[in-house]
Image (cartoon, helix red, strand yellow):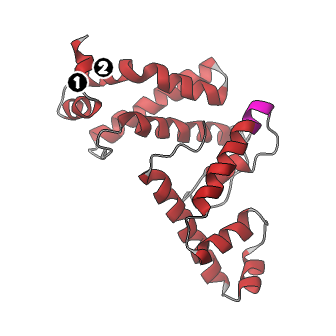
């Protein structure tokens, strides 16, 4: 039990340096929070267990490749991985329409699902509110294109006509808007659902 006095950052470092038991301590320490988070999204024990295992497979691969750089923020990082896997799970089952964005950003797939039960609708409303706040942080030209595309469902041709810029410029602004949103989300360890 004395391992619980060691910080996550030290345990991660120990694991990267070959101490397999350090990962076991991290999993034991955070299992309940991560498991509960996943279950609150999928409401299915078998699916939750699968996503939980996939989450830690991804964690292990990332740590082994030396690509972990979330100093002292192990739990939010793992929650973010599990959140992305939950979204992937829903996409595979075609229960969430995909937003065509070349993989830059996936939260729009959550808010475009119109067939939601009451609990998921509350989560969707919260996500939309959080997202609106983040969109306000974007530069004006990027914000304008993103709102026209996502909320007004305008084509890039229509956006081009309305804003007086070329289609390529409109596409570029949309791409940068998505990249900038992703940066804000990653920088602040935001998980866009509660």
Q: Quick one: label 2, few (<14), some, or many (20+) residues within 10 Å?
A: some
Give yes or no for contact between labels 1 and 2 (Cβ–Cβ under 8 Å).
yes
Q: What number of labels is visible?
A: 2
- Residue 160 vertical position relative to residue 18 in the rendered view, above or below: below
Q: Secondary structure at mark 2?
A: helix
- Residue 123 vertical position relative to residue 101 in the rendered view, above or below: above
Q: To which residue does mark 1 refer?
A: 6
- Residue 7 vertical position relative to residue 63 in the rendered view, above or below: above
Q: Position of residue 137 (x, y in %)?
A: 55, 64
Q: Is residue 15 magenta?
A: no
Residue 163 in which image quadrant: bottom right
Residue 140 in which image quadrant: bottom right
Q: Quick one: label 1, few (<14), some, or many (20+) residues within 10 Å?
A: few
Q: On residue 25, which mark appears?
A: 2
Q: Position of residue 28 (x, y in %)?
A: 37, 17
Q: Secondary structure at mark 1?
A: loop
Q: Position of residue 68 (x, y in %)?
A: 31, 44
Front residue of 137 and 191 = 137
Q: Earlier in the sequence, mark 1 or mark 2?
A: 1
Foreground: disc 1 or disc 2: 1
Please, which residue is most extreme toward the top here? 1
Residue span colored magenta: 117-121
Quarter the C terminus occupies: top right
Q: In this image, 61 relative to 189: left or right?
A: left
Q: Residue at x 25, y 28 (%)?
A: 7
Q: Residue at x 52, y 23 (%)?
A: 35
**Distance from Cα at disc 1 to Cα at disc 2:** 10 Å
Q: Residue at x 35, y 38 (%)?
A: 61
Please, which residue is most extreme toward the right here? 115
């Amino acid at each position: 039990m004395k391992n619980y006095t060691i910080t996550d950052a030290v345990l991660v470092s120990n694991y990267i340096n070959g101490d397999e038991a350090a990962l076991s301590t991290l999993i034991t320490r955070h299992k309940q929070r991560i498991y509960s988070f996943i279950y609150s999204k999928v409401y299915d024990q078998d699916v939750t267990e699968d996503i939980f295992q996939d989450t830690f497979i991804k964690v292990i691969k990332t740590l082994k490749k030396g690509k972990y750089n979330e100093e002292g923020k192990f739990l939010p990082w793992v929650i973010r991985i599990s959140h992305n896997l939950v979204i992937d799970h829903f996409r595979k089952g075609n229960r969430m329409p995909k937003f065509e964005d070349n993989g830059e950003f996936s939260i729009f797939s959550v808010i475009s699902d119109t067939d939601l039960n009451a609990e998921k609708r509350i989560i969707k409303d919260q996500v939309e509110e959080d997202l609106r706040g983040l969109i306000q942080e974007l530069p004006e030209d990027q914000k304008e294109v993103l709102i026209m595309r996502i909320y007004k469902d305008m084509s890039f041709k229509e956006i081009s006509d309305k804003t007086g810029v070329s289609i390529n410029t409109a596409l570029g602004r949309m791409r940068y808007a998505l990249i900038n949103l992703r940066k804000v989300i990653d920088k602040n360890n935001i998980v866009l659902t509660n």
